[in-house]
Structures are given as C-alpha cells and as structure tokens.
Image (cartoon, rainbow, N blue to C red):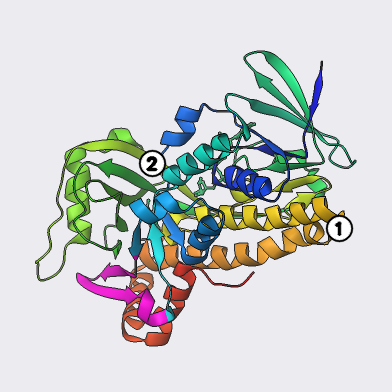
Amino acid sequence: MAEERTRVGIIGAGPAGLLLSHLLHRAGVESVVLEARTRDHVEHRQRAGVVEHGVARILRAAGAGARMDRAGAVHHGIELRFDGRSHRVDFAGLCGRDVVLYAQTEIVKDLIAHRLADGGDVRFAAAATAIEGIEGERPRIRYGTAAGEQVLACDFVVACDGFHGIGRPSIPAERVRHFEKSYPFGWLGILADVPPSATELIYARHERGFALHSQRGPRVSRLYLQVGNDDHVGNWPDDRIWAELAARFALRDGGWELATGPITDKAVTPMRSFVCEPMRHGRLLLAGDAAHIVPPTGAKGLNLAMHDAALLAEALASWHATGDHTLVDGYSDTALRRVWRAEHFSSWMTGLLHRDPNGSAFDRRVQSAHLEFIASSRSASAQLAENYTGLPYV
Ligand code: APR
Ligand code: PHB
C-alpha cells in the first residue's frame, strides 16, 4: 500500500479541524483533513451559534470573517427571565465586549470554502480507523475510503474528531485522566420558519424547566426546552413544543408573545461536562470536543474548539519554522486553563437556570435568590457578562 505523507494529519472537519488546517496553511504548514462524513452532512448539521468576541477576532484576522460580519448579528446583551420577570444583562456596559450570533454550521461552510479555494486537502467520506506510532516521530493514520484502506504518515496527528472519535481512545488509558459530570436532563432543540420573537437571546428559568430563545437570521428561530434525559422527539409533537415554550417564556404581566411557525428540525441533545487531561500524548494532540465537552447553556463548545485550533496552529507553525517544541509542549496546559474556566461557567449557568428533578423546594428558592442577586448586583452580572463574551486571557 502506498503511504502518503503530510506535515499535520487532522482527523475531523468540524470547526476545530477546519480552522486548524486554514491557519496552518496561512503559516505555510501543509496539512490533510480526513472527515468520516460527506461535505453535505457536515455543512447541514444543526449546532450552536454564539461566537465570542475573541473568536470573532481570530476568524477576521485569518481572513475568514467576511460572511460572519455580513450575515451574523452583533449582540450586546442577553435577557434572563425568571419568576415571570425579565432582566437584561448588558454586555457592552458591564464589560465592553459583545458576541456575534452566527451559526456554527455557517462557520463550517465558510472554512470549507476557504480551504478548497486555497487548494487545501480536505477529504470527505474518509473515516480514520487507527492512529499508530504516536510515541515515535512518524505517526500514521489509517483511514478507509470507497477506494479501500489508505495510510497517511505525518509529523503530528491532531484529533479534532469530536467526543465519539478515535483520537482520545488512542492514548493509553494509564496516561490520561478523565473528569466527568452528567446532568439529569437534556435539551430538545428546534429550528422553525418564524421570525424571532425577540432581538436578543432569552435564557428562561421556569418551574417547569429551562427554555432558550435564539435565532438564525431575521426569518428563522432556534429554540430549546429542557427535557428529561431519556426523552425523545417522538414525545414532542409540534403543538406540545409551542405550548411548553409559551408557558416557560411567559411574563407575569403579559406583554410578550411567542410567534409560532413550521418546525423544520427537531433533536434531543444530552448534557454532559467532560475533560481529558492532558490533551496530548507524544505526537497525538487533541482539540475541541475530542478533549472536552460543556453543556450548551454557556455557548462555549464552539468557542473552546476554535481556541484550541488557534493555539495549536501557532504551536505547530513555530515547531515547523524553527524546530522549537516549546509551544507544542505547553499546548495542553495552556488550553486547559481556558477549558476549566469554561467548564466552571457552563456548569454554573446550567445550575442557575435548569430545574433539577432531584432538587428540593429549598434548592429552588436558593436558585431564585441567585438570579435575583445577578439582576440587582452590577458585579454579579458583570461576572456573567465577562464569562459569556469570553475572558480575554491566553
Ligand atoms: N474519522 C474522520 N472523521 C471523524 C471520525 C473519524 N474516525 N470521527 C469523527 N469524525 C468527524 C465527525 O464526523 C465530525 O465532522 O469529526 C468531526 C468533529 O467535529 P465536531 O463534532 O464539530 O467537533 P469540533 O470541531 O471539536 O467542534 C466542537 O461542535 O459538537 C459541537 O458543541 C460542540 O460547538 C462544539 C463544536
Ligand atoms: C444557539 O443559538 O443555538 C444557542 C445559543 C446559545 C446557547 C446555546 C445555543 O447557549
């Protein structure tokens, strides 16, 4: 079997793998991206859509932010709803930053278009089956295509292959430690052909459970409902979804109505917090969901994946240019500092807004008191604003 060679072998064409390949190209480092699914599949799966201030800057600096700046919407705050009342968290006033609402799936489309226009090597329907030799200097990826099994030899392998990929399990179990937290609920997410009922995102905490109102441009709404973690879409006919959303967003004195329309996508997502330490073993590096998962309440999954990619691009470019391994050696520690900040914020935001089915009436009163504190204290809401828009360190 002929063995191909590249500098960096990247598994997975999600935001982490694609941004890494794009940034490496700009730094003059060759890479190959192997993606198990088709281009059509990765360009159409529904994911989150909040881009932190600093991540928007990374995309712009990499020449990949033009469509985001045209089609995305800059958001200067979010609304919290609880106990039938509304409180706005003013990001601009509290921390001077903002976020861009632009769907992850659009970022993926933009990055694929850039890679292909630049002559990049992104192979779809190419599923990695094994990663070999990571403790040596010439790791190899085995992968399957319609033409049969192929081998790609590299200087480094970067697994950007999501939580269920082969990257993380390729590290010997005794060399890594996993940290995990599960939640007794999930999210039912829908996409609907109806103009958003609010200009900013609404995070609602209600006795019946959490709800989130988001948007995909001026004509499409994206909404979520907290559901049981063994629930499934079959239990949720459209009428039930709209009635439940309306109940959870309702304001005590009325004055707000949720517009409804045809639902075009419906899925239940489990909630999990997970971190793998370290994010590297030998010549195998992990990035994005392959190394860490956050519950979606803080909108951090996409942003962490993009930060990992930016750090790795810098580290691998420095190694390529000078042979200096310092940044590659520091990658895991540097990335994990931000990861743990986001893990804290995401589980904190989740606890603040969800109904814990095992919680007591006492817990629910404490939760109300906490929300009340955020609504009445500048320093408490500033902490939320700083974390949500993305802390600038690293
Ligand atoms: N071979 C090739 N590709 C693979 C393999 C494999 N063996 N296993 C998984 N993949 C691909 C998946 O098909 C997917 O396209 O890896 C890609 C991983 O992409 P993402 O799941 O988007 O992960 P990442 O780039 O880390 O982005 C994280 O995605 O899940 C959301 O909330 C998460 O927003 C966050 C973002
Ligand atoms: C989304 O728009 O899909 C979205 C927004 C904010 C979140 C999660 C998802 O916290």
The residue positioned 75% from the left and 29% from the top of the image is 130
Is residue 38 in the magenta section? no
Position of 155 with respect to 123 (left or right) is right
Q: Tell me if residue 286 comes above or below residue 179 in the rendering.
A: above
- Residue 85 in percent (x, y) is at 21, 73
Position of 235 with respect to 42 (left or right) is left
Quick one: SS at disc 1? loop
Q: Which quadrant holds the N terminus?
A: top right
Quick one: SS at disc 2? strand
Determine which residue is flagged by label 1: 324
Mark 1, Cα crowd under 10 Å, few <14 / some 14-19 / many 20+, is: some
Q: Which amino acid does label 1 sit on?
A: Asp
Q: Which amino acid does label 2 sit on?
A: Val
Give the extent of the magenta segment: 75-94
Task: Kindly indicate the quadrant of the structure image that contains residue 197.
Answer: bottom left
Mark 2, Cα crowd under 10 Å, few <14 / some 14-19 / many 20+, is: many
Residue sitting nearer the eye, 206 or 309: 309
Q: Can residue 249 be seen in this view?
A: yes
Task: Look at discs 1 and 2 and give the one toward the viewer.
Answer: 1
Determine which residue is flagged by label 2: 268
The residue positioned 42% from the left and 86% from the top of the image is 379
Distance from disc 1 to disc 2, alpha carbons, whole Å, reads 45 Å
The residue positioned 60% from the left and 58% from the top of the image is 307
- Residue 343 in percent (x, y) is at 56, 63
Task: Kindly indicate the quadrant of the structure image that contains residue 350.
Answer: bottom left
Position of 210 with respect to 346 (left or right) is left
- Residue 248 in percent (x, y) is at 22, 58
Q: Earlier in the sequence, mark 1 or mark 2?
A: 2
The residue positioned 37% from the left and 61% from the top of the image is 354
Image quarter for ligand 2 equals bottom left
Task: Kindly indicate the quadrant of the structure image that contains residue 151.
Answer: top right
